[in-house]
Image (tube, helix red, strand yellow):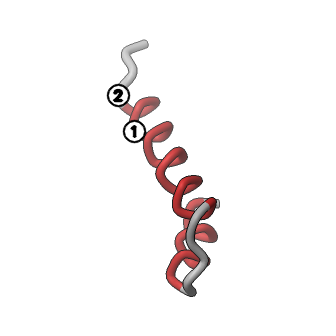
Amino acid sequence: LLACLKGLAAQGCNGPVSEAIDKIEKHINKKAHEQK
């Protein structure tokens, strides 16, 4: 999913695409650093 959004961004789709990439990356980063 993230790769698809980055592909769209590379083709010039901005706005919501960039926001979605940012949110997904933050979410992944947060989950990766959570202690269980």
- Disc 1 is placed on an element classified as helix
Q: Classify mark 1: residues with Cα within 10 Å, few (<14), some (14-19) or many (20+).
A: few
The image quadrant of residue 2 is bottom right
Q: Is residue 35 left or right of residue 20?
A: left
Instruction: Please provide percent x and percent y for residue 32.
Output: 40, 33
Q: Which residue is mark 2?
A: 33
The spot of residue 26 in percent (x, y) is 44, 41
Considering only vertical position in the picture, is 36 above or below 22?
Answer: above
- The residues bearing labels 2 and 1 have C-alpha atoms spaced at a distance of 6 Å
x 34%, y 28%: residue = 33
Identify residue for label 1.
29
- Asked if labels 1 and 2 touch by Cβ distance under 8 angstroms, the answer is yes
Amino acid carrying mark 1 in the image: Asn
Residue found 37% across the figure and 15% down from its top:
35
Q: Quadrant of residue 11?
A: bottom right
The residue most toward the bottom is 11
Judge the density around disc 2: few (<14), some (14-19), many (≥20) Cα neighbours within 10 Å.
few
- Dot 2: what SS? loop
Q: Residue at x 59, y 53 (%)?
A: 20
Residue, far front: 15
- Specify the amino acid type for callout 2: His
Q: Residue 23 at x, y = what percent?
A: 52, 45
The quadrant in which the N terminus is found is bottom right
Q: Which of the 4 image quarters holds residue 30?
A: top left
Relative image position of residue 6 (x, y in whole percent): 53, 71
Residue 16, above or below 36: below
